[in-house]
Image: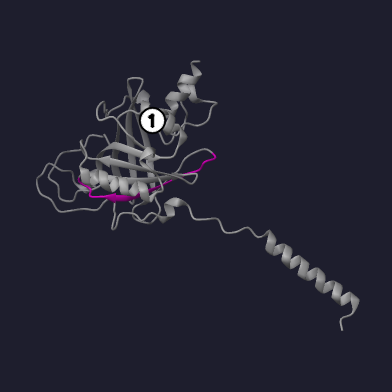
Amino acid sequence: MLFPRTALLLTLLLAAGSLGQRARRPPRPLSPISAIRPKANFDAQQVELGGGRGGRSLPSLIGVRPGSPIPSRPCVACPQFAGTWLLVAVASSCRFLQEQGHRAEATTMQVAPQGTAMAIDTFRKLDGMCWQVRQLYGSTQVPGRFLLQARGARGAVDVVVGDTDYQSFAILYLERARRLSVKLYARSLPVGDAALNTFEQRVQGANLTEDHIWFFPKYGFCDTADQFHILDGEWRHGWAPCRGRAECPSLAQCRLCAAEARR
């Protein structure tokens, strides 16, 4: 038989334990992109032997930003993923894309390896002028997975190269604030049916539908910008019409900011 004081102590201990269990938060579910497997054996500097095809050697590319003059010499070891990619389509549930997708501009991505990271230069027109955005897809020590540091409460952007044949198409996944988007790039246009079919399958696998897909223009590309139209990082210094407003993660959104500023 327990004494009253002992029984009271046991009751308090049991009550405290049950409260502690109720206070524990359930583990946070994994982010959508964590389930995406990167391209098998992907390496930004994956090489293949080649001969005299007017390519560029690996040493001449490392440390050189896309668009910089590179001496032409026979290819001995060429980074397969490096070079120019044209944005074909984007699948996303982003409300802005759904509302403003019709204003999309032709977009070019130039890639250069930086060790295990990738230097990315994105070119697209805004009000008739070609803009260049420089970004670094930082290494995560997992081949095919990268991290783009970004400002703002929404945090960094996770990037995964989900599929590519290096020669004709590439499918990239991007996730920010647990919102996943899928991008299809091509070396040249029009893109082949096989790549389109693969992209559609990837979109469905990301729990998106055909209604979430926006195709980008096939003309109007640009690949150079003057010194006044180059941005480092994700709007690191901001753009005049957008300052004081929500940060613009894309040129298209900054165009909208500018339009609002003129009202």
Estimate the x, y position of residue 104 in percent, counting from the top left: 35, 29
Q: Residue furthest right?
A: 4
Estimate the x, y position of residue 126 in percent, counting from the top left: 36, 23
Q: Which residue matches tag 1?
A: 101
Estimate the x, y position of residue 226 in percent, counting from the top left: 32, 24
Name the residue at 41% across, 56% down: 35
Q: Residues within 10 Å of mark 1 (few under 14, many from 20)?
A: some
Name the residue at 26% across, 34% down: 67
Name the residue at 52% across, 41% down: 154
Left or right: where 247 falls relative to 181: right
Secondary structure beneath dot 1 equals: helix
Q: Residue 84: in sight, yes or no?
A: yes
Give the number of marks.
1
The quadrant the N terminus occupies is bottom right
Give the vertical position of 140 relative to 188 (above or below). Answer: below
Q: Residue 64: in sight, yes or no?
A: no
Name the residue at 38% across, 54% down: 36
Which range is magenta?
153-167
Q: Nearer the viewer, residue 177 or 95?
A: 95
Q: Nearer the viewer, residue 118 or 242?
A: 242
Left or right: where 165 falls relative to 73: right
**Amino acid of disc 1:** Gly
Q: Residue furthest bottom?
A: 1
As for residue 160 lying within the magenta part, the answer is yes
As for residue 149 lying within the magenta part, the answer is no
Q: Nearer the viewer, residue 52 or 165?
A: 165
Estimate the x, y position of residue 40 in percent, counting from the top left: 29, 57
